[in-house]
Image: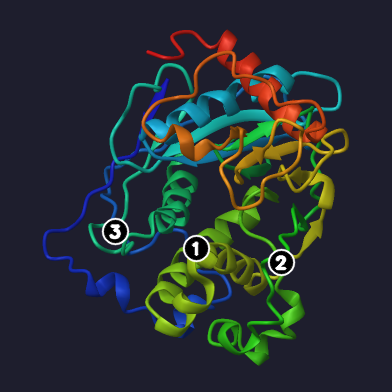
């Protein structure tokens, strides 16, 4: 079932409205969820998101931001397959699921995956950095959708759920995976533009992105507008843009969470990233962001196309085929599990290659 947000862009609105973002607005203690980016009509309605009837205070809603590209679509289908496999198993606090589609129009998965259609940023605002649409899409979803659960898991299309996920958050403290390449202390000089000394030590900024993160719905409603504005401000600051590159939006979420006093319990076992992480038994999520390239003796081929390989980037214009060849003997267990789980999903998803 699909859900459509009713947004419009006033005719006289120009890009300058999006790019002129004052510091005192970015760090305001409790910014309103309703934003001027872009406007919303008074006759817009709240659109419910259907969730399973199972309810406890500890349930979280899984939200995945996506585009309508083939590349994003096949990943979402695999992700949603494994969500359904583990949602109702013992130990799970997984509630409803929403794919937040920020392409601005319905696509072919509306009847397969619960979907909220969000508007993208106006043309040119993301400057080719498409993930800038992610925080703006979350603002729209949180503003319009009725979300029954008290917590939200922000996930991504290239996540495979390995086992039932409990609610790892505690009260106002989120639960997040620590990324080794998010280094607030190293970039303190840059980050002080957005997190001044009055906000406290730079160590209050956790080494996280927005995903995977489990956070209370009320906290995220406060964080999301700030996350959106900090992301835009960072992108339009040449020094910050150069320093952070493709992880800029991740830094923006970490800063915004800290600005609202939401700290995070860091779980190294929350997620693994093959081939560098070799065991999947303790984790909840496999993130297949890196290419897995090996020779036929099971040795990792760093920086080379492997004799055996699995790389999501190989399937940009078509989904991977069913029944992928398993890796050779000696390849880490995490990679074997990844490919085995992809194969199981594609074998059971109808019309996979159509």
Mark toward the viewer: 1 or 2: 1
Mark toward the viewer: 1 or 3: 1
Residue 127 drawn above or below residue 234: above
Q: Mark 2: which secondary structure?
A: loop
Left of 293 or right of it: where is 300?
Answer: right
Q: Earlier in the sequence, mark 2 or mark 3?
A: 3
Task: Tell me the quarter of the image containing the N terminus.
Answer: top left
Residue 123 position within the rendered picture, expressed as x and y whole percent measured from the top left: 22, 57
Task: Give the image quarter of residue 306.
Answer: top right
Q: Is residue 326 visible?
A: yes
Q: Which mark is residue 246?
A: 1
> For mark 2, does the 10 Å Cα neighbourhood hold few (<14), some (14 to 19), or many (20 or more) residues?
many
Task: Tell me the quarter of the image containing the C terminus.
Answer: top left
Residue 38 position within the rendered picture, expressed as x and y whole percent measured from the top left: 29, 59
Instruction: State the separation of the CA atoms marked 1 and 2.
Output: 15 Å
**Residue tagged 2:** 207
Q: Nearer the viewer, residue 184 or 106?
A: 184
> For mark 1, does the 10 Å Cα neighbourhood hold few (<14), some (14 to 19), or many (20 or more) residues?
few
Q: Residue at left 70%, top 70%?
A: 261
**Residue tagged 3:** 38
Instruction: State the separation of the CA atoms marked 2 and 3.
Output: 30 Å
Q: Residue at left 29%, top 64%?
A: 125
Q: Nearer the viewer, residue 183 or 9?
A: 183
List the single residue furthest toward the left.
11
Mark toward the viewer: 2 or 3: 2
Q: Mark 1: which secondary structure?
A: helix
Instruction: State the separation of the CA atoms marked 1 and 3.
Output: 24 Å
Q: Is residue 149 visible?
A: no
Q: Earlier in the sequence, mark 1 or mark 3?
A: 3
Residue 267 position within the rendered picture, expressed as x and y whole percent measured from the top left: 82, 52
Left of 220 or right of it: where is 23?
Answer: left
């Amino acid at each position: 079932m699909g859900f459509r947000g009713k947004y419009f862009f006033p005719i006289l609105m120009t890009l300058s409205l999006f790019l002129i973002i004052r510091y005192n607005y970015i760090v305001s203690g409790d910014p309103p969820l309703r934003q001027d980016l872009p406007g919303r009509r008074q006759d817009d309605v709240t659109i419910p998101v259907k969730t399973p009837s199972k309810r406890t205070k500890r349930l979280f809603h899984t939200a995945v931001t996506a585009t309508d590209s083939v590349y994003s679509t096949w990943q979402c289908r695999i992700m949603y397959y494994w969500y359904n496999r583990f949602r109702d198993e013992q130990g799970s606090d997984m509630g409803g699921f929403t794919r937040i589609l920020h392409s601005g129009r319905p696509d072919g998965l509306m009847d397969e995956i619960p979907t909220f259609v969000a508007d993208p940023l106006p043309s040119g605002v993301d400057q080719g950095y498409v993930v800038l649409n992610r925080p703006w899409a979350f603002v729209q979803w949180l503003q319009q959708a009725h979300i029954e659960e008290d917590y939200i898991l922000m996930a991504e299309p290239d996540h495979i759920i390995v086992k039932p996920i409990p609610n790892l958050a505690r009260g106002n403290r989120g639960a997040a995976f620590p990324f080794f390449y998010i280094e607030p202390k190293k970039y303190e000089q840059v980050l002080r533009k957005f997190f001044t000394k009055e906000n406290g030590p730079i160590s209050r900024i956790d080494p996280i992105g927005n995903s995977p993160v489990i956070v209370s719905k009320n906290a995220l409603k406060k964080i999301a507008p700030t996350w959106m504005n900090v992301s835009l401000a960072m992108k339009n600051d040449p020094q910050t843009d150069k320093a952070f590159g493709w992880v800029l939006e991740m830094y923006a979420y970490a800063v915004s969470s800290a600005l609202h006093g939401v700290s995070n319990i860091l779980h190294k076992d929350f997620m693994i990233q093959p081939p560098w992480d070799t065991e999947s038994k303790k984790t909840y999520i496999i993130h297949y962001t890196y290419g897995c390239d090996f020779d036929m003796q099971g040795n990792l081929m760093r920086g080379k196309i492997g004799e055996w390989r699995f790389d999501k980037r190989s399937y940009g214009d078509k989904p991977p085929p069913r029944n992928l060849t398993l890796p050779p003997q000696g390849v880490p267990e995490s990679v074997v599990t990844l490919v085995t789980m992809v194969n199981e999903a594609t074998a059971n998803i109808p019309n996979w290659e159509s």
